[in-house]
Image (cartoon, rainbow, N blue to C red):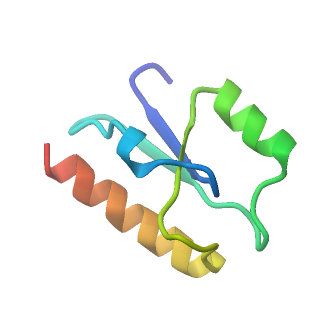
């Protein structure tokens, strides 16, 4: 939807590029164990999603889900 910001966990992502708005809906997509395929990442990027990297290593699904939600909420509240 217009005004929504979408993010997904990506090995080559950059949290600095995550322009998290203070208002509006946020969507965060967490991939399966092993990460998204290149095709899935391309589809997410083509749809306007921004890849973010939460840690220097690949996180487990449950850690990535909780960590990503917490980080995006923090960044939105810091505006």
> In the image, is residue 69 above or below residue 15?
below
Residue lying at 75% horizontally and 63% vertically, measured from the top left? 35
Residue lying at 31% horizontally and 34% vertically, measured from the top left? 24
Residue lying at 34% horizontally and 62% vertically, measured from the top left? 71
In the figure, is residue 38 to the left or right of 66? right
Residue 52 at x, y = what percent? 51, 51
Residue lying at 74% horizontally and 42% vertically, measured from the top left? 41
Residue 20 at x, y = what percent? 32, 40
> In the image, is residue 73 above or below residue 61?
above
In the figure, is residue 71 to the left or right of 40? left
In the figure, is residue 70 to the left or right of 1? left
Q: Tag count in the figure?
A: 0
Residue 18 at x, y = what percent? 39, 41
Residue 2 at x, y = what percent? 45, 19
Q: Quadrant of the C terminus?
A: top left
Residue 23 found in image quarter: top left
> In the image, is residue 50 above or below residue 71?
above
Residue 48 found in image quarter: top right
In the figure, is residue 55 to the left or right of 22? right
- Report the residue that reaches farthest toward the top: 2
Query: Which of 68 and 17 lies nearest the eye of the viewer?
Result: 17
């Amino acid at each position: 939807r217009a005004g929504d910001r979408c993010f997904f966990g990506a090995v080559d992502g950059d949290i600095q590029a995550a322009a998290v708005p203070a208002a509006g809906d946020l969507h965060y997509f967490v991939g399966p164990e092993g990460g998204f395929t290149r095709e899935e990442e391309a589809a997410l990027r083509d749809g306007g999603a921004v890849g973010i990297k939460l840690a220097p290593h690949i996180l487990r699904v449950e850690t990535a889900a909780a960590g990503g939600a917490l980080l995006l909420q923090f960044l939105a509240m810091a505006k």
